[in-house]
Image (tube, rainbow, N blue to C red):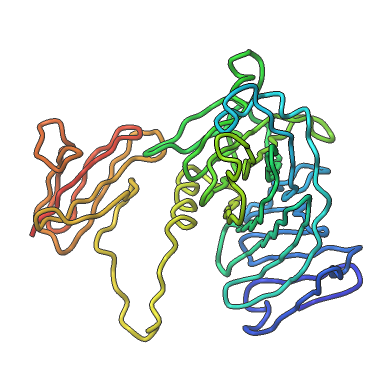
Amino acid sequence: MATNAGSFELPGGPAGLALGELAEIEAGQPPSSSGAITLANGLVSAIFEGPYVVSLKGTDGRECVPPGQRLGEFHLHQDFPNAWDAWDVDYFYRGSLEVLPDPEVQQVWADETGQHLRTVLAFGESKATTTWTLAPGSDALDVRVDVDWHEHERILKLALPVDVHTEKCEYETQFGYNTRPITTNTSWEAYRFEVSALRWIRVSDPAWGLAIANESTYGWDVTRQPREGGGTFALVRASLLRGPRFPDPETDQGEHTFAFALQPGASVVDAVRQAHRVNLPARIFADRTAARTEPIVKAEGAVVESVRLVDGDLVVRLYEPSGVRQRAKLTCPSASTARGTDLLYRDNERAVPIGGGNGEWEFELGPFQVATIRLGK
């Protein structure tokens, strides 16, 4: 661990902190307050100035954070819809922006799960604890936000500005994604100021993109902003909490946890992978000496959405995630037969044709196509 008056660095890789080595900073005493904190693991590098990420890079070295911007600000707005208090978010809420004060850096430490930085912010009657984590071998920076929320008629957002010039953003839906404009050239575009996404969004130009996977919040607003030095950047904000009084004055009150993963240089397939990791984390068994268990099924060119037993057969549902035509391959060594079915697992002449055998089958999928394949012994 290298330290000096201007930095507090937790390098990754073999030269990083040894297991059990700990660097903790007491609340109110941030490390090297005039310098920077770096979390790095050889795949991702995140530089913090105080509680905010001011630089985020992947292996290609491209900077994610626009000049003069920072990841992790909390934005608070008044929230008084004209009607339907708990259902509507009206455009004019944006006129009441309050950037909350800087949180305090509470802890910086490393353990077997990675390198971590934690901040705490008290505002109004509420409190937000943010934990940034860079895990060993991970190509994404994780952030967890724990909020004890006691505000009313307010909306809380987490700001994640991205240094990319684009006119659109991709939002996941079930078995695919929608692309929506982030410009306001028409009234139709202007009123798309709050958009839902299932498990991930991605902002990109033709050569590069940043994927943001989420675990439990689905409202987003993404706008194009003037960039210092010229051009524009995409201001991404996750909508975390509201406090409507009708019909339930206790709506959203209490403790909440939100989790996100930010992957620089991500494709759509990368975004899907991060979304699965955040929402369906691997379960690790305690017996590390046991023989490795191979997956029941493997897929190439498609995403496995679910696996289940139906009348003694193994049913696998897959989909094409990128919006392109793909040749997919499904491997299941324990099966001897495979056939395409409809969504209710029944034989259907319109089901995906399957070719191959001996535990390996191939089939063609159109853009975002869903396939249900029934495997038998």
Residue at image position (70%, 29%) is: 224
- Check the image and report above or below for 251 versus 25: above
At which x and y percent is residue 28?
Answer: 85, 68
275 relative position to 11: left or right? left
Residue at image position (14%, 53%) is: 310
Between 314 and 11, the residue placed more toward the observer is 314
At which x and y percent is residue 311?
Answer: 9, 54
Q: How many marks?
A: 0
25 relative position to 136: left or right? right
- Check the image and report above or below for 286 versus 82: below
104 relative position to 201: left or right? right
Q: Which quarter shows the N terminus?
A: bottom right
The quarter of the picture where residue 339 lies is top left
At which x and y percent is residue 234?
Answer: 68, 35
The quarter of the picture where residue 284 lies is bottom left
188 relative position to 129: left or right? left
At which x and y percent is residue 226?
Answer: 79, 30
Residue at image position (62%, 56%) is: 59
Q: Which quarter shows the C terminus?
A: bottom left
Residue at image position (80%, 74%) is: 25
- Check the image and report above or below for 329 versus 2: above
Between 37 and 14, the residue placed more toward the observer is 37
